[in-house]
Amino acid sequence: MSFTVLSDEQVRSVLEDLTLNELDEFRHVLSSALHQFSKNPRAVPVEPYQQPQYAATIHPDSKATTLYIPCAGPEGIACKVISRTTPDIIKDESVKRIAPTGVINLFSPDGQPVGLVQASTLTAFRTALGSACLLSRRNHVKTLTVFGSGSQAYWHIRLALKMRGSSIKHVNIINHRFSDSAASILRHLMGVPSNVRGREGWANTQFAMLTPSFHDFERLQAENILNADVIYCCTPSTVELFDGEILTTHEGRKKGRLIVAVGSVKPNMRELPETVLRQATKNHDKPHRHFHKHADEGGVIVVDTIDGVLKEAGEIISASIGPTQLVELGELVMLHHLANEDSESSTISSGASTTASERTSLSIDGRAMSTVYSDEARPKGPAASVSSDGQKKKFHIPFRKNSNSSSDQGEKKKEDALVRWLRDGTVIYKSVGIGLMDLSVGFQLLKVAGEKNLGTQIPNFT
């Protein structure tokens, strides 16, 4: 069996040159893996995706923190080893800053080594790819506001431009200072060949950089946030990135936005304001009268992994957001699968007796859900998600409560409410990263690189 080695430059070359169809295939691969992960009862003897707890070490000399992240799945086995200096260590001026670097080791299902991939670009890409699952069907994607200027920020912008370039008119980048990375992200975006920019539809898109050194920074930042259709937070910040009141006032709630936070991955980190998270998870079941038109709010935060977010996402922990206020991205993918099942079997139950107002309906109209998640029909999965202890849990979206009416019109209204929220409402997505992303996207990368004859091949490695 041959062994493939991909450098970071080769990884970037493959990913930069992806056509829209190739990018959609990457997205399909990841969404299918996330779906399998979320539907998996995590208490069966052999799970489709197994993710042991990662290990961490701190080198005594460099002070670099190294994570060892294993995962096994249908594709094979992966173990990412990645090192970096953490924000708390960087405060020590005697410590040299180390940007995230490492490798992803890939093995066949029977344990044969098949690939070694430099992890820096791939990690940023696969994280942005998860966000792209929600971006793909947003109705309005005209203005992006991005916090941060590193690799995560770059790939979130880059995938948005690949997918929605013809509609994106403004990209506003907000950074704590005009650093080397700030200059680099602009240079890389402007360095995309003009023919590629034209093909992807963003030849005339305007880019701007905002830092606290600007006069009237607070006002300009608030304008960038209010004008945004999509907000990407990609910084390892330990303080909230902006005043939550910007988005929780009546003015701020008029417009629906996709808000993505991927930079804070430790309990002491913060990106999103607590007030924004609490507003998004308010229970809106009780009817109330007001004279302000607000975008739809789902009552939940979308996450890549509930267990991981509850342990590692500082803003979620600080805001006391509980598991019933979170829904995994894989569960939303699962709703598209459930659209192809009979309505009698497409309901989620807590497994215990509940009142009608406590139950959540998942009688999904195939046509409506297909407008949220495209792609052809995929394998059907069980209509229940589970907690880490193997117990079934409810998929809690407040505006999808069961109705006593069995009329098609009543069901259609509930189905359209979910579609409308994901398409036009305020949707918050929090990601801390999981090993199956490295596994599924890593194997797809090896496949595409092989088709393009990129990488170093070592024949008869095993």
Image (cartoon, rainbow, N blue to C red):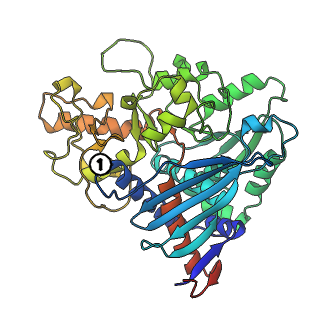
Which residue does the image show at 61% across and 55% down from the upper left?
Answer: 123
Which residue is the extreme one toward the right? 94
Residue 131 or 3: which is nearer the viewer?
Answer: 3
The answer to whether residue 258 is visible is no
**Residue, x 35% and y 11% (percent of image)?**
289
Percent x, y of residue 278: 48, 22
Please indicate whether residue 413 sits to the left or right of residue 114 in the image: left
User: How far across and down, in percent of the image, does residue 48 sit?
Assistant: 35, 59
Residue 380 placement (x, y as % from top left): 25, 57
Q: Residue at position x 65%, y 26% from top?
A: 240
Residue 126 vertical placement versus 296 (above, below) = below
- Percent position (x, y) of residue 219? 73, 22
Question: Circle 1 sits on which residue?
Answer: 41
Mark 1 closeness class: few <14, some 14–19, many ≥20 residues within 10 Å:
many
Q: Is residue 227 visible from the viewing direction of this image?
A: yes
Looking at this view, name the residue that lies furthest to the bottom. Answer: 460
**Residue drawn at x 59%, y 29% as measured from the top left:** 272
Rendered view: 66 above or below 216 = below
Q: Nearer the viewer, residue 4 or 181?
A: 4
On-image quarter of the C terminus:
bottom right
What amino acid is found at the position of numbered circle 1 in the picture?
Pro
